[in-house]
Amino acid sequence: MIKVKVNGNKEFSIVPKSNGEGELNGAHYVCSETEVKPGTYHVLYKNGSYTIDVLRHDAESKTMQVMVNGTRYTLELRDKYDELLQSLGMSAGTKTIREMRAPMPGMVIQIMVNAGDTVSKDQPLLILEAMKMENVLKAPGDAVIKSINISKGNAVEKNQVLISFE
């Protein structure tokens, strides 16, 4: 599933399937697209013809600017992983990280940081054992650790706050 917010306003939920079919806000759709030249597409949807020019695509921020039949739109894209991160309090789109939550129930095996430490994106913070597997939880971005809310050997529940950031 992909969620698309258009011009910071209206949001659409899209579940693409195969052969130009899928669901748009829960309703079945069929469309046909052809790449006319790099970055320009011709789309047929609901008896309408649309020319779509991709003006800018920023994969890191998951945003796009497109021109559809001469009208400019800004799109913000979120996939199932972005939704999961947001539900865990680790939204990828935010610059300020407030907390890390347990993605699943488990046991804290090792804590690799201390309160006051400055951490970098993807730096290992702790190891959580769940279902006999060790999961290394990494920093979602650059931050300073405000507090560690668990100890080695603690059992934690899903969505429990593990680490708070300044």
Image (spheres, rainbow, N blue to C red):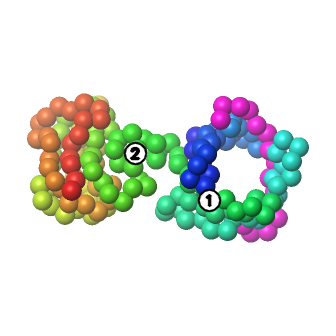
Q: Residue at x 29, y 32 (%)?
A: 158
Label of residue 85 in the image: 2
x, y (%) of residue 123? 27, 59
Q: Residue furthest front?
A: 9
Residue under the point 70% across and 62% down? 72
Secondary structure of the residue carrying numbered label 2? helix
Spatial separation of the CA atoms under disc 1 and disc 2: 23 Å
Amino acid type of the residue that numbered disc 2 sits on in the rendered structure = Leu
Counting residues from the start of the chain, the first of labels 1 and 2 encountered is 1
Residue 91 relative to residue 3: left or right: left
Q: Is residue 127 magenta?
A: no
Which mark is drawn over residue 74? 1
Going by the image, does 139 lie left or right of 37? left
Residue nearest the viewer, comparing 107 with 63 = 63
Where disc 1 sits, the SS reads strand
Name the spot of residue 160 as percent of width and height, x first. Answer: 24, 35
Q: Residues within 10 Å of mark 2 (few under 14, many from 20)?
A: some
Amino acid type, callout 1: Thr
Q: Is residue 32 left or right of residue 107?
A: right
Magenta region, residue range: 25-39
The structure residue drawn at horizontal position 21% and vertical position 42%, both measured from the top left corner, is 162
Q: Which quadrant is the C terminus positioned in?
A: bottom left
Q: Does the magenta portion include 34?
A: yes
In the image, 13: left or right of 28?
Answer: left
CB within 8 Å, label 1 to label 2:
no
Q: Position of residue 103 (x, y in %)?
A: 32, 38
The reply to whether residue 136 is visible in this rendering is no
Report the mark closest to the observer, 1 or 2. Answer: 1
Quarter placement of the N terminus = top right
